[in-house]
Image (cartoon, rainbow, N blue to C red):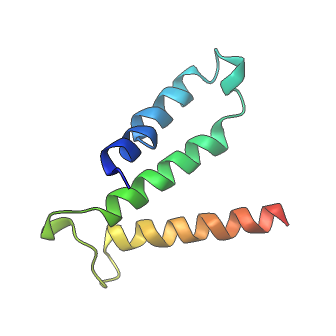
Amino acid sequence: MNVPLATQVFGHEVSVAMAHYQSVCDKLKDSTPTQKFIDVVYKLIKAMSSREPKKALYVKEDCCQKQAILDFLQFLEDWEKEEK
């Protein structure tokens, strides 16, 4: 995976821009679920691609990278329930 490209496509800035223009652009008026998806995927990419030991994934309960992965799994489970 091209991580720099993925972080551009699923970057927090994209989500913020969509939220900013949501009220003025008809094509973005229903983009809130997409914004949430972008944010969740961005956090997952950051959690999975850390190069610094300080930001690495740990087993500890208070590990924010671990929480990002758990949040992504919960997002997928919720999405699957809605689609059934």
Q: Identify which residue is drawn at 40% across, 46% down.
A: 6
Quadrant showing the C terminus: bottom right
> Is residue 3 or residue 33 the one in the foreground?
3
Q: Please, which residue is most extreme toward the bottom here? A: 59
Q: Please, which residue is most extreme toward the top here? A: 24
Q: Is residue 47 left or right of residue 36?
A: left
Q: Identify which residue is drawn at 57% across, 20% down.
A: 21
Q: Is residue 3 left or right of residue 19?
A: left
Q: How many marks?
A: 0
Q: Is residue 5 left or right of residue 39?
A: left
Give percent across and percent down for residue 18. 55, 29
Quadrant showing the N terminus: bottom left
Question: In the picture shown, does residue 50 fall above or below 60?
Answer: above
Question: In the picture shown, does residue 5 fall above or below 74?
Answer: above
> Is residue 34 or residue 51 the one in the foreground?
51
Q: Identify which residue is drawn at 49% across, 73% down.
A: 70
Question: In the picture shown, does residue 24 fall above or below 61?
Answer: above
Give percent across and percent down for residue 40. 50, 55
Question: In the picture shown, does residue 56 fall above or below 34?
Answer: below
Quadrant location of residue 29?
top right
Give percent across and percent down for residue 45. 38, 57
Q: Identify which residue is drawn at 57% across, 41% down.
A: 35
Give percent across and percent down for residue 68. 42, 65
Q: Please, which residue is most extreme toward the right here? A: 84
Q: Is residue 51 left or right of residue 39?
A: left
